[in-house]
Image (cartoon, rainbow, N blue to C red):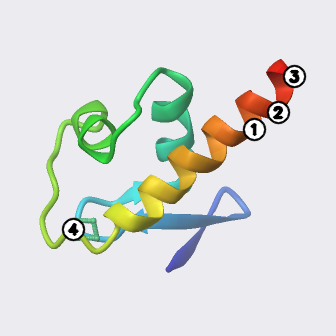
């Protein structure tokens, strides 16, 4: 799902809590290594948990990118 915010599309990862893709990326950059930590960074918790797989995928992709950068 996405909306237009400030002229740019905003992708929502978690519709229950209104957590945007950039919120998840920011939480990961700040050290979140599990979806629960992403929820905590936004002051909420999982409701339906449909977004957890996508959050895990984003966390894994971030780890992978860091691993390649370290090589
Ligand atoms: S979509 Fe994230 S908890 Fe429901």
Which tag, 4 or 1, sits closer to the chain's start? 4
Q: Position of residue 38 (x, y in %)?
A: 34, 40
Q: Are marks 3 and 4 in contact (CB under 8 Å)?
A: no
Q: Using the image, tell me which numbered label, if any, was put on residue 71.
A: 3
Secondary structure state at the residue bearing disc 2? helix
The residue where tag 1 is placed is 65
Q: Are marks 4 and 1 in contact (CB under 8 Å)?
A: no
Q: Which mark is in front, 1 or 3?
A: 3
- Disc 2 Cβ-to-ligand 1 distance below 8 Å: no
Secondary structure state at the residue bearing disc 4? loop
Q: Please, is residue 3 above or below residue 23 in the view?
A: below
Q: Are marks 3 and 2 in contact (CB under 8 Å)?
A: yes
Q: Please, is residue 14 above or below residue 64 in the view?
A: below
Q: Please, is residue 29 above or below residue 54 in the view?
A: above
Q: Is residue 11 left or right of residue 45?
A: right
Real-space Cα distance between discs 1 and 2? 5 Å
Q: Using the image, tell me which numbered label, if any, was put on residue 68.
A: 2
Real-space Cα distance between discs 4 and 1? 25 Å
- Disc 4 Cβ-to-ligand 1 distance below 8 Å: yes
Q: Residue at x 75, y 38 (%)?
A: 65
Report which quarter residue 41 is drawn in.
top left
Q: Residues within 10 Å of mark 3 (few under 14, many from 20)?
A: few
Q: Position of residue 47 (x, y in %)?
A: 12, 65
Q: Are marks 1 and 2 in contact (CB under 8 Å)?
A: yes
Which tag, 1 or 3, sits closer to the chain's start? 1
Real-space Cα distance between discs 1 and 3? 10 Å
Q: Residue at x 16, y 57 (%)?
A: 46
């Amino acid at each position: 799902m996405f909306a237009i915010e400030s002229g740019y599309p905003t992708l929502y990862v978690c519709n229950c809590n209104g957590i945007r893709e950039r919120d998840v990326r920011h939480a990961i950059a700040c050290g979140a290594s599990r979806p629960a930590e992403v929820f905590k960074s936004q002051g909420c918790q999982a409701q339906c948990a449909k977004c957890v797989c996508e959050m895990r995928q984003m966390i894994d992709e971030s780890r992978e990118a860091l691993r390649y950068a370290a090589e």
